[in-house]
Every structure is written in C-alpha cells, then in structure tokens.
Amino acid sequence: MGKRKQKDSFITPEMQLQGVLHDISSPLSIVQLNLDLIQENLDGQSRRELNKFLDKALLGMQQVKRMVINTRFKIAAQSSFSACEQLGLLCSLYKEKLKLKSILLEQDYREDKMLIADVTIFERIITNLLDNAISAFPDDSRLKYIKLRTSRSKYYFSISISDNGKGIIMSEMNKIFNKGYSSSGKGKGLGLFMIKKFMQEYFSGTVSCRSKVGEGTTFYLNFPGKSKSAAT
C-alpha cells in the first residue's frame, strides 16, 4: 500500500507523455484557428491584421516546440517569470477563439508574483483550465464570460479562473482530479489530474475548485510565498 501511494504521488515518464499528448491539442488548435483566419482574410484585411494572426500562430507553435523538447529530453528548464505577464500572453492567444464563441474575457491582475519554474508547465496548467472553461458553456443564449483574477493572502499568491457555465454536480466534485475521470467521454480525463500533479511537484502549490450547477465554476491555483502589486 505504501509503495503504491509513493508511486502515485510522482509524475512518471508515461504520465508525462500522456499529458503532453493531451495538452498539445490546445496550442495546435490556436495555430490552426489563426492560420484559417489569415486564409479567410487575405483579400479583406490589412497587412497589420494578418501579421497579428500570424504572430499568434507562431507563438502557439513555439509553445508546442517547448513542450516536445522538454518532454523528449526530460528537461525542466527553470526560469523566473511574471505570473501576470504570462497570463496576459496566454489570454491574447485565446482572443480569436473566445470571440468566435461569443465569450467575454475579463482579466483582473491586482497582485503579481515572480515564479521560478519551467514556464511550459505553467502554460499547460493555464491553457487546460481555459479550455475547460470554454467547454463548460451550454448551447443557450446566456451572456458567457470567463474571468481571470490574481490575489494574495498571508501565505499564498492565488490565480482564479471562473466561468458562468453549466457547473459541476456535487456528486462529481470529489472525482474531478482523479486520473481518468472525465465528463466528456473516453480518452480524456488527464487535464485536471496533471494540473494537480504539476502544482504539487513544480510549484509546491495546490489546486481547488468551487462549483454550482447552473451558475458556474471557479478553479483556484495557490502558490506559496508573498506576491507583489501588479499595478505600475
């Protein structure tokens, strides 16, 4: 029992590979979307607009490249980066995708923290949560929004990602971070499981969730240590 518990508490190479295969679809979809927009607007848009779409496609490809290289060579490329700057960059990549789905995005970064870790891991955590939020909306006429917010307490710097989607039923809440659990069907169920592992192993942090059916869901990422004001 003890050996199994110890084994389950670490990310194995197999889990890492499965996680990358799961997560790589998000930046690739961003690349595809922006290339499609370029093709659709070749005659109707200015060079400046087309370059904007191309820049986002290139950023998505760079994200894919980092994921593949780090996994292939088992590199944990630690660097120091601003949580808020990285959140802003990732949200900019999702701008067109959210626009097509008529989802409003609100960003409220009142606190910031310099994180020391592999930035690719942070990107995978945030993109997974953004993808979950996007898929949380039912097909109805409600005003749809996703909110990203940073805050701090005495011991933690926190990032919250909220949506006003369909919510998660109470009986499922204690399962959502389990490996293999998914409300979407076979072949999924890795995203939240890997987020929990990444937060524990790379940031010594935690992830939690609050949800109410019909009102929406909020995920909280808690990073230990003090933060700094994001205001300039």
Image: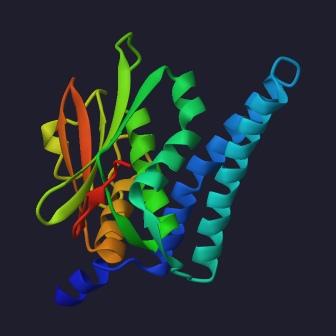
Which residue is situated farthest in the front direction here? 232
What x and y, as percent, mark residue 20?
A: 54, 64
**Relative height, residue 26 to residue 144 (above, below):** below
Residue found 36% across the figure and 32% down from its top: 146
Which of the 4 quarters of the picture holds residue 44? top right
What x and y, as percent, mark residue 163?
A: 31, 32
Residue found 70% across the figure and 36% down from its top: 34
Which residue is situated farthest in the right direction here? 43
16 relative to 28 in the view: left or right: left
57 relative to 123 in the view: left or right: right
Colour mapping used in the image? rainbow
Q: Toward the viewer: 169 or 99?
A: 99
**Which quadrant is the N terminus positioned in?**
bottom left
**Relative height, residue 9 to residue 32 (above, below):** below
Which residue is situated farthest in the bottom direction here? 3
5 relative to 127 in the view: left or right: left
**Relative height, residue 135 to residue 70 (above, below):** above
**Relative height, residue 52 to residue 45 (above, below):** below
What x and y, as percent, mark residue 89?
A: 53, 48
Residue 39 visible (yes or no): yes
Residue found 40% across the figure and 41% down from its top: 132
Which of the 4 quarters of the picture holds residue 197? bottom left
Residue 188 visible (yes or no): no
60 relative to 135 in the view: left or right: right
Q: Could you tell me how many numbered marks the image carries? A: 0
What x and y, as percent, mark residue 9?
A: 28, 78
Residue found 58% across the figure and 75% down from its top: 71
Q: Toward the viewer: 30 or 158?
A: 158
